[in-house]
Amino acid sequence: MAASTTRGERTRDEILSAATQVVLESGPDSFSLREVARRADLAPSALYNHFANREALIIALAFRALGALGGYLSAVPECPTATERLERLGLAYRAFAREHPQEYRLVFECLQNPPTDWTTYITVADPFLVIIGACEAGLASGELHDTHGVGAAGMAYALWTLCHGHASLTARNLAYVDGDFEALAAAGVTSMLAGFRKDS
């Protein structure tokens, strides 16, 4: 039984790896299941032993991409100040969106949170919790100040929306506009965090 389970897990990983390659080439909207099966060296029908349908495979890919985004954020080391750590988390978020645009699309176009409330969401929202934790540390140390009474999660949300907006705009609306938008995004993050500092 254990050997069979391991074989099944390996096949599932091979399908996901093949699907990732196809999605990177074709995009999440028009990738071919037949091509995924070919690259995984499987019959097309064999895919359904591991994924109920195309949507299930896309969701699995999106969760895998979400884990990769979490890896980028988790790799940011501890910093001398909370502000520096938050700046570097913002940089890591933007780097993931820039370096893995298809995976980024999978996360934010193919995953939908079930109905819940904000209080519950912020206790389970990996990898958003990494940013919340950095804000909590800044508040606990006294470096940051909850200027508007939104709590650590609200402060983290402000950083998230700024970085997400930058990633979305530069990937689509500004894709063919020549400008140093990364520098502008960094300046925006620095300015926003200045408003959260205790001495502001």
Image (cartoon, helix red, strand yellow):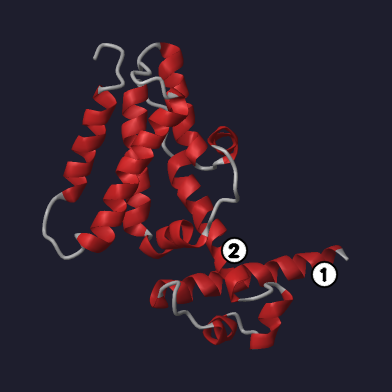
Callouts 1 and 2 close, C-beta under 8 Å = no
Disc 1 to disc 2, C-alpha distance: 21 Å
In the picture of the structure, the residue carrying the numbered disc 2 is: 60
The residue carrying pointer 2 sits among few (fewer than 14), some (14 to 19) or many (20 or more) residues within 10 Å by Cα, namely some
Q: Is residue 73 visible?
A: yes
Circle 2: element type: helix
The three-letter code of the residue at mark 1 reads: Ser
Tell which residue pokes out farthest to the left in this image: 178
Q: Is residue 121 above or below residue 168?
A: above
The image position of residue 87, as x and y in percent, is 31, 33
The three-letter code of the residue at mark 2 reads: Ala
In which quadrant of the rendered view does residue 101 lie? bottom left
Q: Residue at x 16, y 65 (%)?
A: 176
Q: Is residue 152 left or right of residue 122?
A: left
User: How many numbered callouts?
Assistant: 2
**Residue 4 numbered tag:** 1
Q: Residue at x 75, y 70 (%)?
A: 7
The image position of residue 36, as x and y in percent, is 55, 80
Q: Residue at x 44, y 75 (%)?
A: 29
Closer to the chain start, of discs 1 and 2, is: 1
For marks 1 and 2, give the one nearer the viewer.
Answer: 2
Q: Is residue 170 above or below residue 78?
A: below
Q: Is residue 178 above or below residue 159?
A: below
On the rendered image, what quadrant is the C terminus found in? Answer: top left
The image position of residue 184, as x and y in percent, is 17, 43
Q: Is residue 89 visible?
A: no
Q: Residue at x 46, y 14 (%)?
A: 140
